[in-house]
Amino acid sequence: MNIHYCSDYEGMSQMAFDSLLTNLKAKPQQLICTATGYSPARLYEKLAESYQSAPKIFKDIKIIKLDEWGGTNGDYPNTSDFYLHEKLLEPLQISKSNYLSFDSSPTDAKKECDRMENEIQEHGPIDICILGLGKNGHLGFNEPSKTLSPDCHIADLSESSLKHPMANKMKTPPTYGLTLGMANILKSKKIILLVTGPSKKKAIKKLLSREITTFLPASLLWLHPNVECYLDKSSL
């Protein structure tokens, strides 16, 4: 893992954007896994701004959603799906056929995970995986545990995840998560990890200790050969 210490959130977002845009210019046809939340928001804004002057760079990319809240009865404005449509899919004019996504209100969550796993097998592996760091060190909804699931799965949500601003705004609180598994993430050719926010200090400290443990899922990224970690120094 290459750690890049950035002066602030804007600097972190700019460095990640520069890296991602360089990759897209070199190979426009890529499958990109996208996280939601505050950490990657400014990066996505920069991609949207770049689209205005160079739309051809983005015409062949495919987007795959990292995770989704489950059991919300489709509380759409607060879903990961709504976030990605607003931040990426519409600004970059990503077609429906180039968007691989968990249903935000599946009738059968297990079948939905199996379907997404098949999508990854058909269209993957992921070229670039964009991740944020959870307060407890989770990636997507791969929560700290004695064991971690390799493939797309139904996740039990931690107390930390249930307190997420997106979940707090829902009329029907989520009861589970749908997420790509750790193997799906670790098979990505490149990973961009964005780390920001004062609430992440404890997780950041544990991550930088380089101790690999399933109780800090993000620590498994030390096993990957191509991780660029952009760390907002103002969060330390």
Image (cartoon, rainbow, N blue to C red):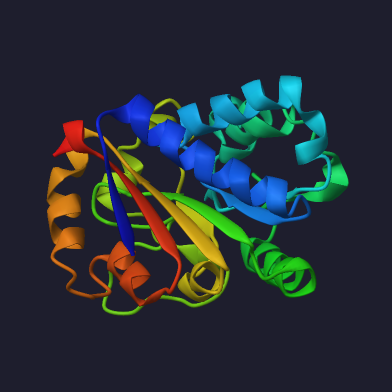
Measuring from the top left, give residue 49's x and y in whole percent: 63, 21
* Quarter where residue 232 is shown: top left
Counting labels gives: 0
At 56% across and 26% down in the image, what residue appears? Answer: 46
Image position, residue 56 (x, y; %): 83, 35
62 w.r.t. 209: above or below? above
Task: Please tell me which residue lies in front, 49 or 171.
Answer: 49
On the image, the x and y values in percent for residue 187 come to 55, 74
* Left or right placement of residue 111 versus residue 159 in this view: right
Residue 6 in sight in this render: yes
Q: Where on the picture, by quarter, is residue 120? A: bottom right
Q: Is residue 203 left or right of residue 25?
A: left
Report whether 131 appears left or right of 6. right
Q: Is residue 75 visible?
A: no
In the picture, the quarter occupied by the N terminus is: bottom left
Q: In terms of depth relative to the viewer, which is nearer, 222 or 213?
A: 222
The quarter in which the C terminus is drawn is top left
Please name the residue shown 73% across and 55% down the image: 27
Residue at figure coordinates x 54%, y 56% from the top left? 129
Looking at the picture, does residue 100 appear above or below residue 38? below
Q: Position of residue 174 (x, y in %)?
A: 46, 44
